Each structure stands twice: as structure tokens, then as C-alpha cells.
Amino acid sequence: MVEAQKNIRTMQGKVLSNKMDKTVTVLVERRVKHPVVGKVIKLSNKFHAHDEKNEIGEGDLVEIAESKPMSKTKTWVVTKVLSKAPQVN
């Protein structure tokens, strides 16, 4: 019997805030062509994502994946860190 592969939505974004415990706020930007004007515009959404180890900092580029709801606003989980933000001394 072949098991069906689940399609899990994933997105990439920049971490805006890590002030909450085990939660980060991720800004996901996408470029879309305006249907009437034809100009390419940037649309953005903010998502709360689960960070189990509290290891992600502000400015990091991360990949998030959809999961079951963990709270009222948190339905995403951080799957990997794509790049760390440069440290300012």
C-alpha cells in the first residue's frame, strides 16, 4: 500500500521579533503583478511561528511550514534557518 504524500505549505521570510517565548514573528514578502495597472508590487504578511529552542534572532532569514494550530494566532513552525543576521557590536 502506497502512503499519500502530504503537501505542506512552506514560505521564507525575515524575523521581525523574537520577544515572545518560543515564538517568532516572520514577515513574508511576495511580488505580484497588479491586475489593472500591470505594475509589480510587493505584498507582505506577518505570521507567528513556533521556535522550540528559542535560538532564532531578529533579522534572520527562515523557512516556515504550516502545522496544526498551537494557539489562537500560531499555526506555523520554523523548519530551518537559511541565514543569520549580521551581529552589530
Image (cartoon, rainbow, N blue to C red):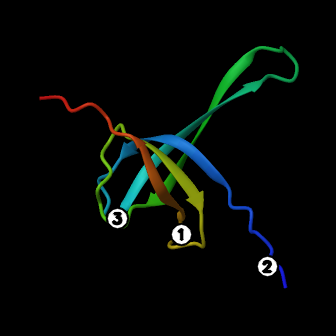
Q: Distance between the residues labelled 3 and 2?
A: 32 Å
Question: What residue appears at the point 39 percent right and 61 percent down from the top-left corner?
Answer: 51
Estimate how packed mark 2 is, as few (under 14), some (14 to 19) or many (20 or more) residues with alpha carbons within 10 Å: few
The residue under the point 68% across, 61% down is 8
Earlier along the polypeptide chain: callout 3 or callout 2? 2
Measure how far apart labels 1 and 3 are at the Cα level: 15 Å
Question: What number of labels is visible?
Answer: 3
**Residue 72: which numbered mark, if any?**
1
Q: In which quadrant will I find the C terminus?
A: top left
Q: Where is residue 54 in the image (x, y as percent from the top left)?
A: 29, 60
Report the residue that reaches farthest toward the bottom. Answer: 1
Q: Is residue 1 left or right of residue 30?
A: right
Nearer mark to the viewer, of 1 and 2: 2
Q: Nearer the viewer, residue 68 or 85?
A: 85
Q: Quadrant of the N terminus?
A: bottom right
Type of the residue with mark 1: Lys
State left or right for residue 73 relative to residue 82.
right
Q: Residue 54 carries which label?
A: none
* Residue receiving disc 3: 22
In the image, what residue type sits under mark 3?
Answer: Lys
Percent coordinates x, y for residue 75 in the rendering: 56, 65
Query: Toward which corner of the image does residue 6 lie, by quadrant?
Result: bottom right
Name the residue carrying label 2: 3
- Residue 28 placed where, x, y %? 56, 40
Q: What residue type is labelled 2?
A: Glu
